[in-house]
Amino acid sequence: MKLRSALLPTLILGLLATPFAAQAEGDWKKGRVYFRMVCTACHTEKAGGAIAPTTKTMAEWKAYIAADKHAKGKDSLKYYVSKKYRESIKATNKAAAKFIDDDEAALLEDITAFMIKGAKDGDSPAKCN
């Protein structure tokens, strides 16, 4: 009986926390700024159009980011949040200049949080303007 009474609150707490476990840890608002001002600008200029977070599900974005492949596998995705990349575009991109000293891993987490939140099946499916 003691085991059951101790197990029930743990089970309820676990079920209540499940939706929050799907969220990325970063600051999605900061990730949105970087994505829209850096990623979208580059995709529009060089790839023929913006990529909206709603083009993939949360699982697809997580897999894409974990694979660290960009431009059909030609580049590392992490390069585009690196300080080296931000340095290379800071003269023409205000967001790259604004985030120049940010930690690369933290910035990638921020972008990931935005992509997960804005995914097809995310909390707030987002489209890029």
Image (cartoon, rainbow, N blue to C red):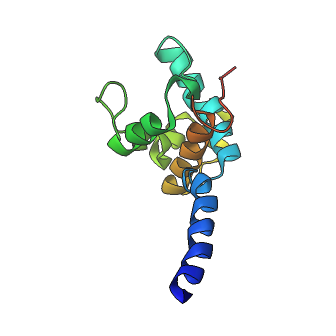
Asked if 129 appears above or below 86 in the picture, the reply is above
Residue at screen point 63% across, 43% down: 31
Residue 49 in view (yes/no)? yes
Position of the N terminus, as image quadrant, is bottom right
Q: Seen in the image, is 37 located left or right of residue 58?
A: right
Q: Quadrant of the C terminus?
A: top right
* Quarter where residue 49 is shown: top right
Q: Residue 2: x, y in percent?
A: 55, 88
Q: In the displayed image of the protein, which residue is found farthest to the bottom?
A: 2
Left or right position of 56 against 71:
right
Tell me residue 67's x, y (percent).
33, 41
- Examine the rendering and report whether any part of residue 102 can be seen: no
> For the view shown, which residue lies furthest in the left direction?
74
| Residue that lies at the very extreme toward the top in this rendered image | 48
Q: Residue at x 36, y 25 (%)?
A: 71
Total count of labels: 0
Closer to the camera in the image, 52 or 82: 52
Q: With respect to residue 98, does 121 lie above or below?
A: above
> Which residue is at 54% across, 80% downward?
4
Where's residue 85, x and y in %? Answer: 47, 40
Measuring from the top left, give residue 111's x and y in whole percent: 57, 43
Q: Nearer the viewer, residue 88 or 110?
A: 110
Q: Is residue 67 above or below residue 14?
A: above
Residue at the limit of the structure toward the front, as seen here: 1
